[in-house]
Image (cartoon, rainbow, N blue to C red):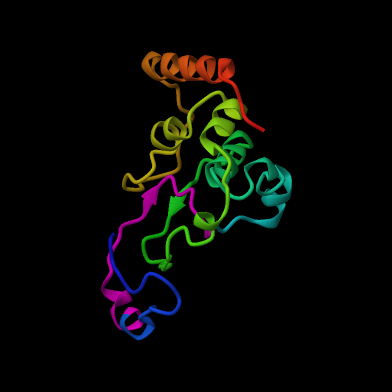
Amino acid sequence: MGLDYGSDIKEFCEAKLLKNYRNIEKKDWYGSTWPPNIVHIDLWDLVGGMSIEFSPGMYSDPDFSAKLWKSGVRVFKGIGKSKVYHFGSKSTKRIKTNIGSNLFLSKWGITANTFSNQILKSGKKYKSELGNIKLSNKYLIKNFAKTMLKSFSFRKF
């Protein structure tokens, strides 16, 4: 959305945000993979919460959504009336991060981008729960090729 109420806690314009947030309109959308999430504790426990291999958080969100998808969840709905202000990657800029995209591809056999865009329909207007998805040959070939390329690349530990 591009609204600027400060880039860190010191510059945060809380009064301005509180004055304006009711005027920020956004429709419900498909494919929400970003925290904050609301998930029943039984479902959290069923899928094991966030996966440690993605720590410090790179691609842990789509991984969590993929675990939910595999467990049968078909409602991935961003709520337009719900608002969160995010300063943007303040903690992950300070640390050495993993290559989460490669981990996601290795774990699921599909890119996070394909999962988010083709299965969860991320960002599109929400209409109803998602059905089972059959990827086109184009995406199957693309994801197979990426999986093969990554499996032959050398990894640094």
Q: Residue at x 72, y 45 (%)?
A: 48
Q: Is residue 155 magenta?
A: no
Quadrant of the rendered image containing residue 70: top right
Q: Residue at x 38, y 69 (%)?
A: 7
Report the quarter where the C terminus lies: top right
| Camera-side residue of 151 and 74 | 151
Determine whether, in the image, residue 86 is placed left or right of residue 20.
right
Report the quarter where the N terminus lies: bottom left
| Camera-side residue of 130 and 23 | 23
- Decide: is 14 above or below 90: below
Q: How many marks?
A: 0
Q: Position of residue 63 (x, y in %)?
A: 58, 40
| Camera-side residue of 111 and 29 | 111
Report the magenta residues as a range. Answer: 17-36
- Decide: is 105 above or below 86: above
Q: Is residue 20 magenta?
A: yes
- Decide: is 89 above or below 144: below
Q: Position of residue 22 (x, y in %)?
A: 31, 76
- Decide: is 145 above or below 35: above
Quadrant of the rendered image containing residue 12: bottom left
Residue found at the very far bottom of the displayed protein: 15
Q: Position of residue 31 (x, y in %)?
A: 43, 45
Q: Residue at x 46, y 14 (%)?
A: 145
Q: Position of residue 53 (x, y in %)?
A: 67, 40
